[in-house]
Image (cartoon, grey):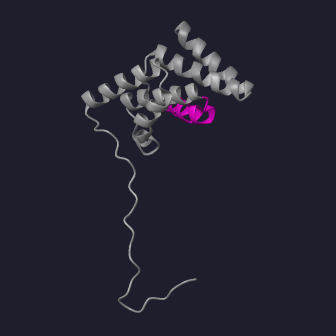
């Protein structure tokens, strides 16, 4: 039911919900975050990686730099590790498209991201998309 408030009376306003604030873009802070995420991935603490890096999605993706690409790549790896293939694809396709616009990863890093994307598409039985990723990763590994 809609309630009409007499002039001057307004319903109480709720405080706006705030999204988590991304960590500082200070290079040392980002380097520390990258190291921590890699350590957690190595120990298969995928949920912890997601908790640490999820703050970078999706607003941070608008203007992604080299560190940002790496963070999103690690986030994709964590989602893949947990078996959340669609979330992993979301991250890894963003890495792929960011790299097409402005390459910032090494060939090996991009080939690894494409290999992970291949695993995701294969897991969802999207064979044509999987084959494209695999072919692109192999070209990079050959240096082409």
Residue 118 visible? The answer is yes
> In which quadrant will I find the N terminus?
bottom right
Q: Chief secondary structure of the magenta span? A: helix
Which x, y percent locates residue 15? 36, 65
Query: To which quarter of the image does residue 31 belong?
Result: top left
Which x, y percent locates residue 58? 47, 43
| Magenta run includes residue 91 | yes
Name the residue at 39% across, 69% down. Answer: 14
Name the residue at 64% across, 22% down. Answer: 119
Q: Is residue 47 left or right of residue 9?
A: right
Name the residue at 40% across, 40% down. Answer: 63
Q: Is residue 10 left or right of residue 86?
A: left
| Magenta run includes residue 78 | no
Residue 99 visible? The answer is no
Compared with 56, 70 (above or below) is: above
> In which quadrant will I find the C terminus?
top right
Q: Nearer the viewer, residue 26 or 64?
A: 26
Which x, y percent locates residue 38? 41, 21
Q: Residue furthest top?
A: 142
Residues drawn in magenta: 83-100
């Amino acid at each position: 039911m809609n309630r009409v408030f007499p002039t001057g009376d307004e319903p109480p306003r709720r405080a706006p919900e705030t999204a988590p604030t991304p960590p500082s873009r200070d290079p040392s802070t980002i380097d520390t975050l990258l190291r921590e995420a890699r350590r957690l991935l190595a120990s298969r603490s995928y949920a912890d990686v997601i908790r640490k890096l999820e703050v970078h999605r999706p607003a941070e993706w608008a203007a992604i730099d080299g560190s940002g690409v790496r963070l999103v790549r690690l986030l994709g790896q964590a989602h893949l590790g947990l078996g959340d293939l669609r979330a992993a694809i979301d991250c890894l396709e963003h890495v792929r498209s960011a790299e097409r616009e402005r390459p910032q990863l090494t060939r090996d890093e991009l080939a690894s991201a494409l290999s992970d994307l291949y695993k995701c598409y294969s897991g969802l039985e999207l064979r044509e998309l999987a084959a494209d990723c695999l072919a692109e990763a192999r070209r990079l590994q050959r240096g082409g």
